Image: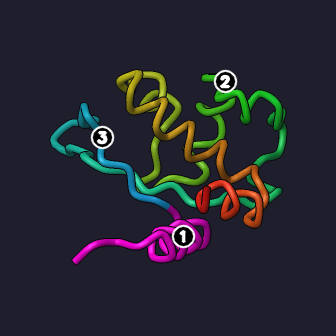
């Protein structure tokens, strides 16, 4: 069964509401716990307190270290974020940055 553009648009729209799960290239190890995937959800304005939206949109590492612990499941620590594989940080950061774009603009981009 193939996925249509409408299906992809609907999936992207749903991800804005519930969050998106990112499978990590390099798992996070916390003692005996191994984290292989992280779900990030759209932050509320309060969860963005003290953070420059410009920095967040540019995927500034320090801004991501502050925001990701507030919007990730399982909850990542600043230390976890600082030790992420760069490819994983880039994917998580891109997802967070996409939350700053209005839904209509994001859907228009996905349709093209």
How many residues crowd around disc 2 within 10 Å: few (fewer than 14), some, or many (20 or more)?
some
Q: Which residue is mark 2?
A: 60
Label 1 vs label 3, nearer the camera? 1
Q: Which residue: 58% across, 54% down?
A: 71
Q: How far apart in space, not on screen, are marks 3 and 2 (Cα)?
A: 19 Å
Q: Taking 92 as reference, is 37 above or below it? A: below
Q: How far apart in space, not on screen, are marks 2 and 1 (Cα)?
A: 28 Å
Image quadrant occupied by the C terminus = bottom right
Instruction: Between residue 59 and residue 8, name the one nearer to us.
Output: 8
Give whichever of discs 1 and 3 has the lower sequence position: 1
Q: Which residue: 64% across, 29% down?
A: 59
Residue 73: x and y, percent?
44, 57
- What secondary structure characterizes most of the magenta part? helix
Q: Which mark is residue 49?
A: none
How many residues crowd around disc 3 within 10 Å: few (fewer than 14), some, or many (20 or more)?
some
- Let me know if residue 9 is in the magenta part: yes
Give whichever of discs 3 and 2 has the lower sequence position: 3
Disc 3 secondary structure class: strand
Q: Which residues are magenta?
A: 1-19
Residue 106: x and y, percent?
69, 57
Q: Which mark is residue 9?
A: 1
Q: Which residue: 56% across, 46% down?
A: 95
Disc 2 secondary structure class: loop
Q: Which residue is mark 3?
A: 24
Image quadrant occupied by the N terminus = bottom left
Residue 78: x and y, percent?
53, 31
Q: How far apart in space, not on screen, are marks 1 and 3 (Cα)?
A: 24 Å
**Total numbered labels placed on residues in the image:** 3
């Amino acid at each position: 069964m193939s996925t249509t553009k409408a299906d992809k648009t609907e999936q992207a729209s749903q991800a804005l509401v519930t969050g998106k799960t990112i499978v990590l290239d390099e798992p996070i190890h916390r003692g005996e716990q191994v984290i292989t995937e992280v779900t990030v959800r759209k932050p509320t304005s309060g969860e963005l307190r003290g953070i420059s939206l410009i920095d967040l949109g540019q995927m500034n590492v320090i801004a991501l270290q502050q925001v990701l612990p507030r919007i990730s499941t399982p909850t990542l620590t600043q230390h976890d974020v600082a030790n992420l594989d760069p490819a994983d940080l880039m994917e998580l950061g891109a997802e967070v940055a996409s939350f700053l774009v209005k839904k209509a603009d994001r859907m228009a981009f996905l349709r093209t």
